[in-house]
């Protein structure tokens, strides 16, 4: 492998379990979203994202209640909508700060991130969760505050995770050539897009998933198996 200088990691299914996101974070946001929109709906930030959600759904005029219903439907279908993700991030903040939950980390992730950083690698996050949600996730993780390890965060404002151009934008933003960057994810379509942009790829297949005999990307059961 060409010398890797930067690692960009996905979150859900890669650093952390899918079940924490689906069974803890999503239900928390789903339950609180209606009240949150009612109580914060007049702030310019919330108004902006409600407007973006309506635009995304091609709705010209909608009541607040209709947009809430739209967003709840999107949570249920796990739609990777930038507007929904921004609102979820705002709602999750309360849960982290009140200690209701801490973000799940697979057991080896924090030590491996520390080791890579210690070796001089630059670490970044690219997730469908908003940048605000990503920072909360790593600040309030089960393994402590990991935010000092990261040099930057990217979300779908950079572009969809299954499109090559998003990875081109990321390498440009971090000032590296693609062949010096390793992207880690559990989703093959994301890895295909990153590879098309010239990045190295690592496919996380967390147990009980098994590495197939001829994986489409270099495959690993844990971060400990990765040697950048
Ligand atoms: C940043 S925590 C919430 C993660 C989230 O909302 C999500 O959709 C996960 O997507 P990922 O790109 O990390 O697989
Ligand atoms: Mg993922």
Image: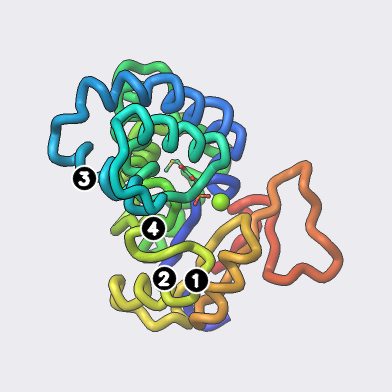
> Which label sits on residue 166?
2
Circles 2 and 4, Cβ within 8 Å, touching? The answer is: no
Circles 1 and 4, Cβ within 8 Å, touching? The answer is: no
- Under circle 3, the secondary element is helix
Q: Judge whether 107 appears above or below 191 on screen.
A: above
Does mark 3 have its CB less than 8 Å from ligand 1?
A: no
Q: State which tag comes first along the sequence, 3 or 1.
A: 3
Q: How many marks?
A: 4
Q: Disc 3 designates what residue?
A: 48
Q: Quadrant of residue 35?
A: top left
Q: State which tag comes first along the sequence, 4 or 3.
A: 3
Name the quadrant of the C terminus.
bottom right
Circles 3 and 1, Cβ within 8 Å, touching? The answer is: no
The alpha-carbon separation of the residues under discs 1 and 4 comes to: 11 Å
The one of 29 and 63 positioned closer to us in this rendering: 63
Q: Disc 1 designates what residue?
A: 163
Q: In front of the other: label 3 or label 1?
A: 3
The alpha-carbon separation of the residues under discs 2 and 1 comes to: 6 Å
Name the quadrant of the N terminus.
bottom right
Residue 190 location, x and y as percent? Answer: 56, 65
- Under circle 1, the secondary element is loop
The alpha-carbon separation of the residues under discs 3 and 1 comes to: 25 Å
Residue 61 location, x and y as percent? Answer: 29, 43
> Which label sits on residue 156?
4
Circles 2 and 3, Cβ within 8 Å, touching? The answer is: no
């Amino acid at each position: 492998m060409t010398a890797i200088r930067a690692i960009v990691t996905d979150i859900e299914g890669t650093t952390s379990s899918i079940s924490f996101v689906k069974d803890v974070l999503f239900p928390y946001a789903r339950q609180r979203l209606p009240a949150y929109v009612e109580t914060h709906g007049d702030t310019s930030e919330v108004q902006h994202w409600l407007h973006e959600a309506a635009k995304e759904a091609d709705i010209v005029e909608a009541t607040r209640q209709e947009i809430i219903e739209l967003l709840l439907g999107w949570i249920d279908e796990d739609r990777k909508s930038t507007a929904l993700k921004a609102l979820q991030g705002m709602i999750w903040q309360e849960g982290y700060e009140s200690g209701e939950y801490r973000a799940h980390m697979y057991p080896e992730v924090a030590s491996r991130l520390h080791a890579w950083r210690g070796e001089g690698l630059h670490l970044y996050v690219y997730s469908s969760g908003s940048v605000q949600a990503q920072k909360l996730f790593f600040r309030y993780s089960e393994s402590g505050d990991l935010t000092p390890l990261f040099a930057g965060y990217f979300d779908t404002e950079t572009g969809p995770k299954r499109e090559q151009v998003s990875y081109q934008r990321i390498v440009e933003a971090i000032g590296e050539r693609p062949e010096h960057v390793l992207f880690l994810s559990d989703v093959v379509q994301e890895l295909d897009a990153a590879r098309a942009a010239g990045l190295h790829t690592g496919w996380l297949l967390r147990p009980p998933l098994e590495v197939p005999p001829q994986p489409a990307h270099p495959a690993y059961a844990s971060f400990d198996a990765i040697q950048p």
